Amino acid sequence: MKNLLPALFGFILALSIAHTSLGQDCNLSIRGKVIHLENNQPIYSAYIWLEEINSGTLTDENGNFQLKGLCPGQYTLKIQYLGHKEIIESINLSSSPFNKTYRMEEESLELSGVEIHGHKDAIQTTTAVTALYGEALFEARGENLGESLKRIAGVTTFSTGNSIAKPVIHGLHSNRIMILNNGIRLEGQQWGAEHAPEIDPFIADEITVIKGAETVRFGPEAMGGVILVNPGELPVKKEHTTNLYVLGASNGRMGNINMTHTGGSGKIPGLGYRIQTSAKKAGNIKSPDYYQGNTGLSELNFSGTLGYTSKKLGVEGYYSYFNTELGILRDSHTGNLSDLQEIIANGRPFTDAEFTYDLINPKQVVTHHLVKLKSHYHLNPNWKANIQYGFQMNNRKEFDKRRGDLNERASLDLELFTNTLDIFIDHTHVNAFSGTWGLNLIQQANNNVPGTGVTPLIPNYDMLNLGLYGMEKYSKGPFELEAGARFDIRSVSTARYIQEELETADLSYRNFTAFLGAYYQISEKLEFSSNIGSAWRPPNVNELFSQGLHHGAAAVEIGDQNLESEKSLKWVSSLEYSGKKSLFEITVYANKIKNYIYLNPTGETYSSLRGTFNVYEYLQANAMFYGLDFSGSYEFSEQISGYVKGAITRAKNLDEDNFFPFIPSDRMDWGLSYSFGKDGKKNKVTLSNQLVAKQKREPDFDLAPAPPAYALFGIGYMKKMTIGQNKLNAGIQVNNIFNTSYKEYMNRFRYFTDDIGRNIQLKINYQF
């Protein structure tokens, strides 16, 4: 009996312990996010390990991880990533789940006597972001920037013919969209509807679109969104890579070649360089039934980068040169009022052009130089000081049909000089906070080059803009909260002669903007982000002072000196689902703009010796833009996959209770792909279809009704091969397979001609 009692007591105690253990909540989790201490960039494939359960995982592309099915207790978490200091933390997991953001500090890693350091800057934002890279970017090679970005849901183009395209984000374009060329805001004559961005997409390793109002981060011209054209990182050790692209297209008989060489020094660790050059030539493009006269183009571009990186210091110099000559559809410049009315009624040119590479007037010749000098210095592991200077010179010449010797003179000859200076400090800490504080200075001088024999469309002007801003982010595991504020002050001085009388004006603008955004990873597969921000844009000089014929646009434009600054409040929310076989994202937005400036057709015409032109005037109204973007993909099997994307945009004139001109109509793209082949030789065939609805929400007056809806089919084949240590990518794409005649509402030349017909493109990329 004495021996039985202790045994019975032990049995009861064991049952009690077992019961307690069985009753525990073992559905707890440890969630977290791993990012670089230096710049808040997510770390992909960091190694996460829990010693007590002898199990682990890897971080995803956003730096997130999750370990599920854990019981309450004490755990030892290890985080490892090559070239960074290991993190070991003891976690007491109780009844609630555990969330935390981990910032990994870089440490020197010596390989063959070379120290490797990563110093890539990351732009983290809680608004909707989409990027083109890898295979999608390869498929876009040979296209201008605007056409390339049409692959992203919610991005369309405002075009003038086939060769001139401006990106449109959620219905906004031109001075409301900021483009950054390797971190420098691109400053050209972007106010013109037919002024395409002066940038070569071949410089990009990745093109990113931020769809929110990013005025606080980048300044007034970012009220509609931002496009980041980013080259790849420079090597910091001895290595060399060359990328060769050879492209051709049947329509326009286009040829395009690009070569990029990137290398690192073996004698000076941390020193890297890149040189890139491209050339492009195309002739008259063809609609399904006829050639469009004088629609060819030529380009010659170059860029070079030299950078040095050490553990604390980074220095980079960058130069890019862009040169293009673009023909303007000759039939868009008509002789008299009856000719203009007849060609609009006819819907196509009366003249039957032939194919040629020759360019005649009307045409554009544009050159753009950009110089960037940037340096950063790590004051300590948590604080980094940055300074960046940019210089740009833009020369735009527009030639019109003129008589005698005047035909060789530009009708519009503008030189724009821009200096930008950015000074800012980044701070990151092991705790949950990080941020950026800084100032931005922009100085600009725009001059009309004398000798055109034509009264300048816009006056000479000097502009100075100073912006002060601050942004802070709180991160804890799957949750991020971000806020920022900015104050800008701008002064503009103008001068020009009108009938031998000097007219001057001095204008000043100032405004405060702010934003608040949040991101939350609901689960391993579901993410949600939301951002609301105020934005503003002062009226551009052309909107204030245009008084004459804009030759490249084939239109007379009338400005208004009493225009006020645009002010907006934009809300953007995005939900993304990422499963093993499926990916889906939907973005909704609403953007209320006070004093929205738009170019409106008056219904009047202007006749001169150069022809008859439609008259447009700049007006203001309160506006509401809203809509949604969606995109998704699904893998039906290892070989077959499909995708779909689309956008709906609404833009209402709240004052007149009607609609604005040139707003994208509803559209959807879908496609199916079949992949086959073994490693080293992969093949993919894609069938695609684009559906574009008729724009039924037209303004009260337009020169012609909106064109009907259309559907275009395309097919593509891509092959990836490995040849020794080198890679070969080859592809063929056929757009508009059935040679369908159609007109895009967002093409300003839809009044005069159909859009481009069937086009067969061949693309070859060799990496060695």
Image (cartoon, grey):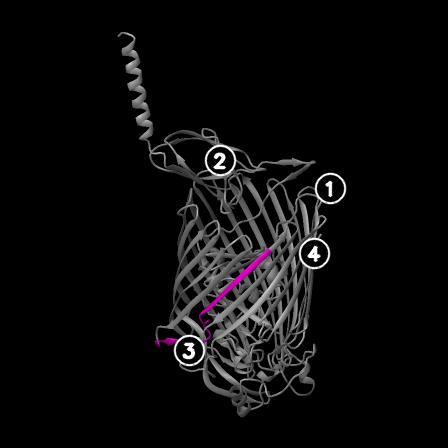
Residue 714 appears at what percent x and percent y? 57, 68
Find disc 3 in the rendering and name its residue.
698
Q: Amino acid at mark 1?
A: Lys
Q: Is residue 659 above or below residue 719?
A: below
Q: Are marks 4 and 1 in contact (CB under 8 Å)?
A: no
| Mark 3 crowd level (few <14, some 14–19, many ≥20, 10 Å Cα) | some
The label nearer to you, 4 versus 3, is 4
Residue that label 4 marks: 766
Q: Is 225 on the left or on the right of 733, as rendered?
A: left
User: Marks 2/4: CA distance?
Assistant: 39 Å
**Disc 1 versus disc 3: distance between alpha carbons?**
64 Å
Q: Is residue 344 magenta?
A: no
The answer to which of marks 2 and 1 sits earlier in the sequence is: 2
Q: Which residue is mark 2?
A: 56
Q: CA distance from mark 4 to mark 3?
A: 47 Å
Q: Earlier in the sequence, mark 4 or mark 1?
A: 1
Name the spot of residue 728 as percent of width and height, x first: 68, 55
Q: Amino acid at mark 4?
A: Tyr
Q: Which residues are magenta?
A: 656-675
* Front position among marks 1 and 3: 3
Q: Is residue 388 left or right of residue 514?
A: right
672 within the magenta span: yes
Quick one: 376 or 623, which is closer to the camera? 623
Residue type (three-letter) at the residue carrying disc 3:
Glu
Gap between marks 2 and 1, in whole Å?
40 Å
